[in-house]
Image (cartoon, rainbow, N blue to C red):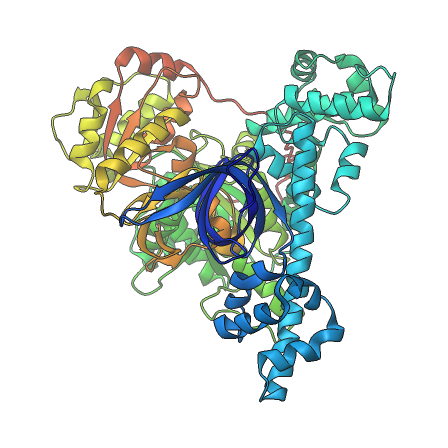
Amino acid sequence: MRQSSYDFDDTVVVEKVLSQLERGCIFSGRLSDGQPIRVKFAGADTQSLPGDTFHVRGLLGHHRDKFGKTVVQIDSKHMRRVVTPGALLRPWLERLPNIGETRADRLIAAFGHDLQTVLSDMGRASEVAKLIEPTKPALAAKITAQLYAAVATQAGADKIRSTEVEFLTFLETMGMQESRVAGQIWRFMAGFDAVDRLKRNPYVPACLMDWKPADRIGQRLLRAANEGADLHCHPNRLAGALNSVWRELLSEGDTAATEETVKDLLANRGVDPDTTLRLAEENSSLRRIGALLRAPGAAWLEDQVVSALLSIENTSPTVPIPSGQALESLVYDAELETGLTLTAEQHAAVVLLLTLPVAALQGGAGVGKTTVMKVLATAWERLGGDVVMGALAGKAALTLSKGASTSARPRLAYTIARLIGMAQRQGLQAENPAFKRPTSDVDFTSKSLLVVDEAGMLDTPSLHKLLSLMPQGARLLFAGDEGQLPPVGIGRVFHDVVAEGSRVARLTQVLRQAADSDIPKVAALVRQGQTPVLDSWTGQAKGVFLVPFGELESVQRQLRGKSELMVIAARKATVEAINESESLEARSTTTPTRRLGPLATVAVGDPVVATANRYQEGLFNGLLGVVDSIAGPEVAIRWDGEREPRSLPQAAEADIELAYAITCHRAQGSGSQAVVIVVESSRLVTREWIYTAITRSRELVIVVGDSEVLTKSLARRTTRTTGFSLRARIPMGAAHVGRRP
């Protein structure tokens, strides 16, 4: 080891990553002489992988593991990635197919520190082959070719990683301290010329981080390139400020805003609003709809969705729809087939929905939306069509499957993520008939009726993706409740379609079986803004009750394990505190755990939630599950609505959080036997928030808080502004909607 002002100053090859922290990492590795060592690095995000090489400076110490073994540890704040020198290739070589420890030893012994150079020179391949397998030249040639290919791949990866380090270092010199955002900017601009492109577009960070640090970086870059220029009114700075405004609005789910709102937000960023908007209009980067200004990317998505919906309506039907009494008779026959007797309101809804290529079924808790969908599906199939059913959450899909099926005609509903995956594979097979897709995949046809339940939580990007994959002639039905919160992501297409009104069938009557539960009654009061009178909870299994905030922990401990439980809170700090305390309570000192990312260390039995859409992996933002097993690096999760657990892809690990408690947005689309709702004094807790939380429960709701805070919360409303505009539908002819004779 070379001595310096630090105790340790040398190169280390990573053998095993022990922990990937939010700011740093811990890994075990080896020095060039083979000596094992442990490195604990605290600094900017550094994604270390086995085989990576770092130059490390730090203080020598020791670490004692849980088995009592002591190893040398370096505590470092200074670490940079380097290209692996010859002898340090040993750990990487040993893991390569057909190399192993013995052949790696031969190569190291023969070439030492020159090995990297040798393996980069194809002219020396014959020397390498003789060392790898002296008595089997054919096998040696094959293994050598594989080795040189692996080295070339590794060299390319090293170069990219080296470029990434240089880029992140450049950001640090510009004053960026937010390592997560720095990583986002790199992923956005990744490439060998990333620094040059950032200099040409100095306000790219404004799309990804708060304005003040983005402006600081932007002005430094502008000053370096435009010495003496007026940076305050520089066009790049004005454009960056407007992009920062769009970022803030989009983070709240809005896709548009009034001009006054945009001007206020621009003024808060220290730029002249009128000049900024005038420049944006001159550059054709400002879009308007009525009195609203629209976020550019979101505007494109919304317009694409509108175009797709109008295309569905303007396509000639492939399933002929009868009219008049024939239509009435069709619905009556479907009722008989399902063994159901619809109310007059439900019957009228089915008749109307059959006539609409794009439709919305609107109804609150307990009005029988699933019953209507079951009869509608039966009627559609009697006409020769096929039905595809989906919902964003796994449990919602499972509930829809059960509610829409009959003994003679089972119907499976899928998550939207799975439907998108199925449609993508169907498209691939259409392009290449040799492509094989699972036999369990559904087929989308020109006669398909796509039913999307809990549609209020479907964001605009997800809907755009789904619609882009639907075949011409297919029809679409949204089903949901406009009283609930809008989606986690941007937009609120279902709410906007219901508000427009020309494509909507409404259900308002709470059914007798639902009336036996207090949940629909209380939900209806909350929806109207009235504070319900709630009894104290003394252990009842059904109903809606109120308990003081101080009893939250006691309530959780009584319910957890005895019934299916969902705990909903508004503040992230509250969610994190509950997750930490409940996970510690559930584990012993010997419970196997696995760190998935900076926000989650999980154990078997832990409830978890996905926090991002990953359609290829069948995951979406808000999907709930339970950790089924942990075997080494592999974590298996049984997701809601799925019968078997499946391994969590490594790429998705950072998008998983504990779910002993979740936010209300995460809870949308899912349900639970018992729901505990933490009503805090927060602007996030609104009438729609409380209504959504209450309607997640099937049997028991416990409101944690007090009546005064509950009343104030019910007076607050959730608002969302969008630029989505679907013109009113012009009826092709009024459908006869009659009452049962």
Q: Quadrant of residue 519?
A: top left
x and y, in percent, of residue 694 in the image? 31, 30
Do we see residue 618 in this rendering?
no
Residue sitting nearer the eye, 382 or 410: 410
Q: x and y percent of residue 15 in the render? A: 48, 56
Counting from the top left corner in percent of width and height, residue 429 is at 61, 69
Residue 259: image location, x then y, percent: 70, 17
- Residue ID at (36%, 29%): 575
Give the total of numbered labels.
0
Q: Which quadrant is home to the C terminus? A: top left
Q: Quadrant of residue 254?
A: top right
Can residue 6 be seen in this snapshot? yes
75 left or right of 545? right
Q: Is residue 627 above or below residue 58?
A: below
Residue at image position (60%, 29%) is 250
Q: 188 or 423, which lies in front?
A: 188
